Amino acid sequence: MEIKRVVFVGAVMLAASTLALAGPDPRPAGGTISGKVSYEGTPAKMKPIDMSKEPSCAKMYTTPPIAESVVTGPGNVLADVVVYISAGAPDDAAPSTAAVFTQKGCRYIPHVLAFQVNQELKIVNEDQTSHNIHPLPKLNREWNKSQPPGTPPIIEKYDKAEFIPVKCNVHPWMHGNFAVMKNSHYAITGDNGTFTLPNLPPGKYTVTAWQESYGDQSQDVTISGGETKSITFTFKAKPY
Amino acid sequence: MMWAWRGTMGKFFAVVLVIIAVASAYPIVMHHYPLPEDISTHGHLIDEQLNETMIEAGVAFVGAQLVLAFFLWSFTGRKPGSPLKTFPGGAKGLVVFAFVIVGIEVLALGVMGQKAWASVYFTPASADAVQVQAQAEQFAFYFRYPGPDGKFGGIHPEKIDEGNQNYFGLDPENDVAARDDIVSGELVVPVNKEIHLMLHGKDVGHSFYVRELRLQQDFMPGLDLSLHFTATKVGKYEIVCTQLCGLGHYNMKGYLNVMSQADYDAWLKQQSQ
């Protein structure tokens, strides 16, 4: 009798766990990792950009624009930092919308553009002068393309995840970055230095923050349900 | 039919030659192609040299065409069998004569013009000239001033970072002399003061050319070349790259901004902040 009961309970448990494993995870994918990226120390003073060689762009500014390698916000926060899940999440298929990178006033807008592997990248020239956009990847294929004013956007895509600096062959001060992501869990901090990564199923994740001058930092975060976990990244600023 | 009026075509051609020679010399003589404004202390030497060359070449050109027309007119349509005159000494004499005549002309121009060349290239800049370094890269000019400490910082190619505006590869963190260096996209100079321009090529061949200064010099990668000039008139003048350097060469230019001494000092002070 005892053995039969044990066997019966064991069989029920086996069946239940098998059922549980067989179908999709019934727990909600609603976990969030949010937080802030700050710096300590004194960041280098960003210099104004001298566009005198391109008068058609220089005249668009009343005061010369400032270089954007390090963008800070009130409260010692860093903007333009890419925060993303670097481990623990599966790769995602690329969305159908294009990521748009604009050349305007002889600058790249936005300074850092994050998009996914195989997502369409659309490069637009809104200036009265020709540009020659030249991304500098190490893993992906390198190319550069001329884009005179009034010509259609350049359509490209990247098939490997990478951080790619972007320059213009005609205007040496133009500088931007592409952040090619493997999954859809990424954010770029704004002027308040904050980021939010929602819709995370339970699991153990590695969150990485990347800033073009200061490099990257990673932290491990575990999500067990629908909670919001808050983390901060602090970069050491370089005075030069 | 033409052979009946012996020499008609020859004489007609001689007339046409004279017309072409005179018509092409006319716009030059009447100064329909004026030189650009001269704002440099050595500019007049270059302009004189240009004018002397033009006069010499012009006289030789028109003279040669007129002599050719004369011979054509005189000797066309001569009766078959009439004796030919030859140049004294034959073909060899002709070659020697041409060699000597042209040689004298070229040597004369060279001797007369050597002062223009020497004043720019064989005399060094004076010790109290304003020092400016000019760097040519694909596809812009950048200029560096030593700043209040009067010393240029070192150039470290591995530190060049265009996106961060470090075009020269300065290392202000470790190199104190580099901390106050002023880097500008415009060549700003005071008027009536000698400028010592040190040319440094960053990548490929470029050339610095300001036509109003009558100054042109190629950048040679690996060489640091020296130029000096004194600008005599306030204003903004175009610097163009005149050596094909790649796909952006058409757009490679900068501006020379000649200011009064007071404006220049104010500009320096503002850049140092």
Image (cartoon, coloured by chain):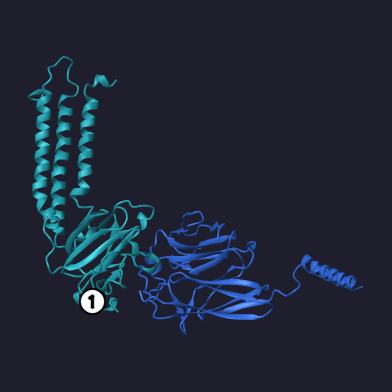
Chain colours: A blue, B cyan
Direction front: furthest residue:
A2
Direction right: furthest residue:
A1
Q: Amino acid at mark 1?
A: Asp
In depth, the one of A201 and B152 nearer the eye is A201
Quarter in which the N terminus of chain B is drawn: top left
Query: Where in the figure is residue A100, as x and y percent of width and height?
Result: 55, 65
In the image, is B235 to the left or to the right of A107?
left
Chain that bears disc 1? B
Element at badge 1? helix
In the image, is A216 to the left or to the right of A229?
left
In the image, is B123 to the left or to the right of A204?
left
In depth, the one of B47 and B144 nearer the eye is B144
Query: Where in the figure is residue B199, as x and y percent of width and height?
Result: 23, 59
Is B83 above or below relative to A193? above
Query: Where in the figure is residue B269, as x and y percent of width and height?
Result: 25, 78
Quarter in which the C terminus of chain B is drawn: bottom left
Q: Residue at x 67, y 77 (%)?
A: A224
In the image, is B165 to the left or to the right of A196?
left
Residue carrying label 1: B263
Q: Residue at x 77, y 67 (%)?
A: A21
Is B53 above or below relative to B195? above
Label 1, residues with CA under 10 Å away: few <14, some 14-19, many ≥20: some
Q: Residue at x 28, y 74 (%)?
A: B179
Q: Residue at x 30, y 58 (%)?
A: B202
Q: Quadrant of residue A227?
A: bottom right
Query: Where in the figure is residue B134, as x and y percent of width and height?
Result: 26, 63
In depth, the one of A223 and A161 nearer the eye is A223
Direction top: furthest residue:
B81
